[in-house]
Image: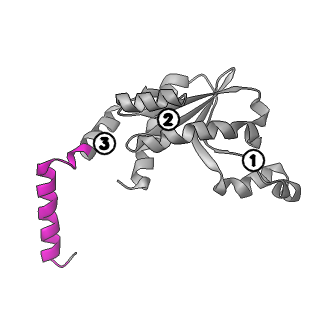
Amino acid sequence: MCARKTRQVEGPWLTSYILSHYAKFPVIYDQGLGSIPDELVRKYGTGKAIGLYDPTRYHVDAIVLLPRYFLLIEAKIFDVTPGLGKLPLYAALVSVTPDLRQYQPRDVLLELVVARTNDNLERMANAVGVKVVLYVTPQIEVELRRRESYQLPEYRAKREQILKTRESLGLE
């Protein structure tokens, strides 16, 4: 599945999760993390420097502003390990992120929202201080089943026939 399709599914899924678990708290989506080069701040001011530098920053899926904590959330449906690996690194950038200065001081909590989990993922997450949260909606269950069907012999045979037909028609 391409990243674009995954994002189209992950975005609404993440929003659904946050609304069902943290509706009463402020949320910042797709927050850039890390410091901004001093030369940009001096030349353009903080606000414009953030905007100019933002494409090169690391982005966390969401930050929930809890009373005493920043809750950093990464939501991954399929390839969950990169999300797990990013969260502890993102936590290190919170204290130097100018966009979050107004909310300091707060400690950082980390959550990885997933549609499937297993003992190994839980073990790795525990080792790096990340809470794994299983969250599945009906739409995500359909996507998971569709993705998992790619490995079934029936799907592979059907796909092979489609490719042969396309090739015989000169489309491939």
SS at mark 3 in the image: helix
Across and down, in percent, residue 114 comes to 41, 34
SS at mark 1 in the image: loop
Residue at the spot x=12%, y=70% of the render? 165
Q: Which image quarter: residue 56?
A: bottom right
Q: What is the C-alpha distance between the residues marked 2 and 1? A: 27 Å
Q: Is residue 104 left or right of residue 119?
A: right
The rendered magenta stretch, by its main secondary structure, is classed as helix
Which span is picked out in magenta? Answer: 148-170
Report the disc number at residue 35. Answer: 1
Residue 134 lies in the magenta-colored region: no
In the image as oriented, which residue stretches furthest toward the bottom? 170
SS at mark 2 in the image: helix
In the picture, the quarter occupied by the C terminus is bottom left
**Badge 3: residue crowd in 10 Å (few <14, some 14–19, many ≥20):** some
**Badge 1: residue crowd in 10 Å (few <14, some 14–19, many ≥20):** some
Q: Is residue 86 left or right of residue 107?
A: left
Q: Which image quarter: residue 30?
A: top right
Q: What is the C-alpha distance between the residues marked 3 and 1? A: 37 Å
Mark 2 against mark 1, which lies toward the viewer? 1
Q: Label 3: which residue? A: 143
Q: Amino acid at mark 1?
A: Ser
Residue 153 lies in the magenta-colored region: yes
Across and down, in percent, residue 65 comes to 65, 28
Q: Label 2: which residue? A: 15
Please tell me which residue lies in front, 111 or 61. 111
Mark 3 against mark 2, which lies toward the viewer? 3
Please tell me which residue lies in front, 67 or 58. 58
Q: Amino acid at mark 3?
A: Glu
Across and down, in percent, residue 129 comes to 55, 28
